[in-house]
Image (tube, coloured by chain):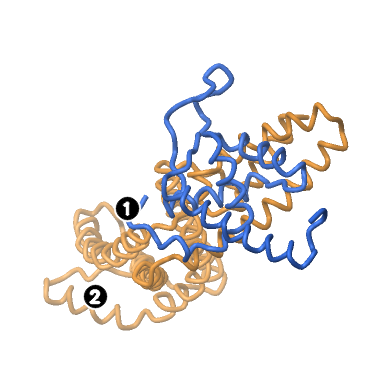
């Protein structure tokens, strides 16, 4: 029973801001542990009162400390963090734009021919794939925002926000630019036999969910990587 | 902890929890739970502070330079290494004195107006 009480209290300590919890979480838990131990010697009523006081103390102070954190953050820090958050959110649609372009070209004929013709082909096709390149990222951006919000909750780190935003922004053009020559090379070597695809209605309904599933998987993978990176640097007990 | 201290009077009046902690530490170095118990003892059980209130107050007091962490273990046989001990700084003692004098002045006013029992 004592261990369950301690575990439950430890879980409730998550209500405090991460910084305060890292610094004082163990000490607060130790003080509660001592108080509970003394209360147990006085009987069940004392244990109940101990818990009541601990809960009111925890709720009031956790809220108060969270308010303090918001109030004491410097203007520069808040601005940088806010801008980093916006940059990160904006970078996600860009990332999915790149992914959708690649997925769209995956089902298209290659621009086999002269180098100038190939470039012309890709430029012309890029201008035409509006549904796949713009429609899906809009849907996916909603999912991305949820994931970004979670990542931000995990971390108060402004630098990490900017790093993720920069990575997303750089990955997009680099991936697209690398994809085109690799695709041409693979087709040129005969590793892939291209057959023109004409979408009958049923195939369209199958193809779209498959693409969405691919993107959701990528989002999930990205989320796991972010989470792993954060958790490996600081110990957080996630509820 | 900053070397720049705020003027003593700018900190007054102190929050009750802060003043009680300072009073306890004016006597001897204590760890967190020791402070909680001592406050209860000093006030005859009228004042009980929880762990959250205690460590939020301690955090503020450390930042203000009223108290500091102590490396010494006054009672090594009874203590474990994880406990942090705290002690009053000279600045903290001056602030405690100022707050005590402020309260004494108020008590004297209350006494003159017959508001204190036995006066």
Q: Is residue B45 visible?
A: yes
Question: What secondary structure is found at the residue carrying circle 1?
Answer: loop
Which chain has been coloured blue in this picture? Answer: B
The percent coordinates of residue A160 (x first, y second) are 35, 57
Is A177 or A129 nearer to us in this picture? Answer: A177
Residue A196 shows up from this direction: no
Figure colour of chain A = orange
Q: Is residue A11 left or right of residue A96?
A: right
Judging depth in this view, the residue of A212 and B114 nearest the camera is B114
Is A156 located above or below residue B76 in the figure?
Answer: below
Q: Residue at x 44, y 79 (%)?
A: A131
Q: Residues within 10 Å of mark 2 (few under 14, many from 20)?
A: some
Q: Quadrant of residue A158?
A: bottom left
Q: Residue at x 87, y 33 (%)?
A: A44
Give the chain of mark 2.
Answer: A
Residue name at image x 23 percent, y 63 percent:
A174
What is the chain letter for disc 1? B
Q: Which residue is mark 2?
A: A122
Q: Is residue A12 left or right of residue B11?
A: right
Could you say where residue A152 lies in the image, as x and y percent from the top left? 46, 60
Residue identified by numbered label 1: B3
- Give me the disc on residue A87: none
């Amino acid at each position: 029973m004592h261990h369950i009480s301690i575990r439950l209290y430890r879980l409730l300590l998550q209500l405090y801001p991460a910084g305060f919890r890292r610094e004082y979480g163990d000490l607060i838990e130790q003080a509660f542990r001592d108080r509970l131990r003394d209360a147990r010697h006085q009987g069940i009523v004392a244990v109940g009162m101990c818990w009541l006081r601990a809960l009111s103390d925890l709720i009031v102070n956790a809220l108060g400390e969270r308010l303090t954190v918001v109030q004491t953050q410097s203007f520069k820090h808040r601005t940088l963090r806010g801008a980093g958050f916006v940059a990160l959110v904006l970078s996600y649609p860009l990332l999915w734009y790149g992914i959708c372009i690649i997925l769209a070209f995956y089902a298209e004929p290659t621009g086999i021919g002269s180098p100038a013709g190939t470039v012309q082909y890709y430029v012309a096709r890029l201008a035409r794939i509006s549904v796949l390149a713009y429609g899906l990222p809009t849907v996916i951006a909603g999912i991305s925002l949820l994931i970004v919000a979670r990542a931000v909750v995990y971390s108060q780190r402004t630098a990490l926000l900017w790093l993720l935003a920069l990575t997303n922004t750089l990955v997009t053009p680099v991936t697209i630019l690398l994809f085109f020559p690799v695709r041409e090379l693979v087709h040129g070597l005969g590793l892939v036999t291209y057959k023109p695809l004409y979408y009958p209605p049923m195939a369209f309904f199958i193809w779209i969910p498959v693409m969405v599933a691919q993107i959701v998987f990528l989002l999930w993978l990205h989320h796991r990587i972010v989470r792993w990176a954060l958790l490996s640097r600081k110990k957080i007990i996630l509820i | 902890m900053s070397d720049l201290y705020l003027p003593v009077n700018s900190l007054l009046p102190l929050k009750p929890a802060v003043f009680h902690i300072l009073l306890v530490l004016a006597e001897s170095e204590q760890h967190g739970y020791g402070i909680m118990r001592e406050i209860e003892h000093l006030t005859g059980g009228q004042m009980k502070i929880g762990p959250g209130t205690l460590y939020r107050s301690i955090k503020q007091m450390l930042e203000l330079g009223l108290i500091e962490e102590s490396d010494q273990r006054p009672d090594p046989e009874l203590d474990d290494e994880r406990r942090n001990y705290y002690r009053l700084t000279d600045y903290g003692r001056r602030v405690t004195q100022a707050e005590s004098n402020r309260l004494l002045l108020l008590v004297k006013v209350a006494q003159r107006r017959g508001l204190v029992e036995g006066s």
